[in-house]
Amino acid sequence: MESGAEYGENAVSLSIRHSAECFPNRSQSTMCGIVAYIGHREAAPILLEGLKRLEYRGYDSAGVAVLDEGRDSAEALDLVKSVGRVRVLEEAIEQHGGLSGSIGIAHTRWATHGGVTQANAHPHRDDVSLGHGIAIIHNGIIENYQSLRTWLTEKGHVFESETDTEVLVHLIGELYDGDLEHAVQNALREVEGAYAIAVICRREPGVMVVARKGSPLLVGVGSDEYVVASDQSAIVAHTNQAFTLDDYTVAKLTRDSFRTSTVDDVEISAKVHKLEVEIEQIELGDYEHYMLKEIFEQPRALRTCIQGRIDHRAGQVRLGGVNDFGRELARAKRMIFVGQGTALNAAMIGEYLMEDLAKIPTDVEFASEFRYRNPIVEEGSVVVAISQSGETADTLAAVEEARQKGAMGLGVVNVVGSTISRETDAGVYLRVGPEIGVASTKAFVGQVMVNALLATFIGRRRFLSQEQVNTLLEEMSAIPDKIERVLEQSESIRDATARFIGRENWLFLGRGVNYPVAMEGALKLKEISYIHAEGMPAAEMKHGPIALIDDGMPVVFIATRNSQYDKVVSNIEEVRSRGGHVIAVATEGDHEISRLCEAVFHVPDVIEPLQPLVSVIPLQLLAYHAAVLRGKDVDKPRNLAKSVTVE
Ligand code: G6P
């Protein structure tokens, strides 16, 4: 893995902003995966393989449409949809007698509005009797679809589904006059909302039109072929060259050329760039699950994350994406960290780091709560959005809320070119590589590491001495090797987990910087093994949860040697005396704690602010092994999506 892009580097050449509409209401946008192909090869296998690569995003139905130029025009557009996994769709295609043609579109849908039905699954077609044989796949929401539907119904259109997407394709059909590109542009000028779409038409079999506003879309550029997808994982098997569409732009693709324009048909240029991801990074390799692969990738991912950013000789942190903002950040009066899920737990650690190292008053907020609270954002505030995907709807809206009120927006994001990275003033990429497992692991340690780098970067411009910075840099650089030592214990962690696998309720407790680690440990366990687990500050236990502790409840303590160690040990005694089974994460060499616990996972000694980077590792492994021992589908946990683009 090479060290990757810096914030600001990946913007396409022309950025079109309709400022008032930059953040459409994404509240109802659907969370989908889209793949499209135009070229000289059979489309169906490429589309299905692409859909499988996007399975990790979460979905409940899927569909494919393929254009066969060799067939009689009326039957040239063929379409198969099904409820359930992509393999169900594959079977449906087989029963259908296959799909032939070298241009096609495919989709995985995660239902939010409108049931999980075959009719609601994409692709959708324009009106069967009035239409021109146009098919569409769409990720997003057309907010004014009701009024458009009424207008189209008056014109004689008959709809087969309840979806906004079908309204959009009927609108395109209504405006079609022999030029698909213009029909799409004209239709998009009429719609409000968010979209990433790919459209094909049997009357123009060598053309595909794609467009984007507010939902992710990437166009992979091959040799006389294009692969379009929601993210790069569905593209890299075919090409490592791609361009991103900016909001309000449309691309017309033929097999050997492309033209990009605005929805007002002003021609613009698109910059083709090299994708950051290599195919090996998204392959499972010898691992049984992506989650395990990503847990074991953490040392390497963090080496890439810090590479070129820690300068031991100069005793400095260098962060390309924020270097120009050093003074502004050092003068910040308040930092507000926002995120959801695992990113929120990393944000909580960010709060500790920012207050401890940079001495800036910091709050951490669920993005979903912050955005609707009419929050007070004073001058000099910096909002820090933590997000693996860079697409989480609530996090995006929280940043926008704070920026509207004058805050500077900073992104701590993994996916290069994602919406949050484009809608913030500056930021730092995690550079941990693509994360496929729904349960976030390497992104979490990347987020914590970047928070530590940021806090050191700002802290040095405020109160940190050179000596303190040198210590931090040394400790940060040593983390990858230390994580490797923890990973060696995977087998023994599995054996210990097996002893408690029948228990349905678990507590995770920690103090200080390890309290968010307790939260993260509980989240990991419930996400993939469906065991009920709660994380909380260890001191909070006495205010209620202690009533739950009886003979048999596993209680996991994060009890590494630090300023609060003695207090944590007292809490362990309290649990023991009530019959709870104590499992601890403790510092190497701490043998005394073993006499109080039924299982101890040791982690190397690390300075207190960085302890989460090692103390979380045994908890990730515990959750992983618990899920496997319970026979759960680790990489596709029920009801969860990797990227939550709905609120
Ligand atoms: C989903 C994922 C979580 C993730 C959260 C925030 O719930 O399942 O693993 O932590 O979204 O996602 P983000 O991409 O913003 O980090």
Image (spheres, rainbow, N blue to C red):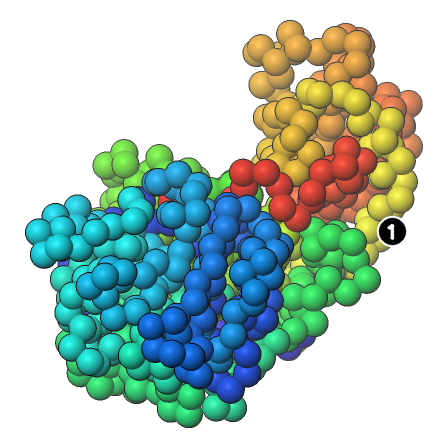
Q: Is residue 239 left or right of residue 483?
A: left
Look at the image and tell me in which quarter the N terminus lies.
bottom right
Q: Quadrant of residue 309?
A: bottom right
Q: Residue at 31% across / 81% down in the picture? A: 204
Is residue 8 visible in the rendered image? The answer is no
The answer to which of 641 and 455 lies nearer the viewer is 641
Relative side of 246 to 615, left or right: left
| Residue 55, image x, y percentages | 57, 55
Question: Residue 65: image x %, image y %?
Answer: 44, 66
**Would you name the residue on which mark 1 appears?**
488
Identify the residue shown where x is 54% and y is 41%. 640
| Residue 465 lies in quadrant | bottom right
Is 603 on the left-hand or right-hand side of 385? right
Q: Quadrant of residue 573?
A: top right
Question: Where residue 634 sits: x, y (%)?
Answer: 69, 44
Q: Can residue 112 be seen in this snapshot?
A: yes
Say which of 296 and 25 sits in front: 25
Exactly how many numbered labels are in the figure?
A: 1
Question: Is residue 265 left or right of 7 when viewed as pictured?
Answer: left
Work out whether residue 197 or residue 5 is closer to the camera in this orientation and state it.
Answer: 197
Q: Position of residue 121 (x, y in %)?
A: 41, 51
Amino acid at the residue labelled 1: Glu
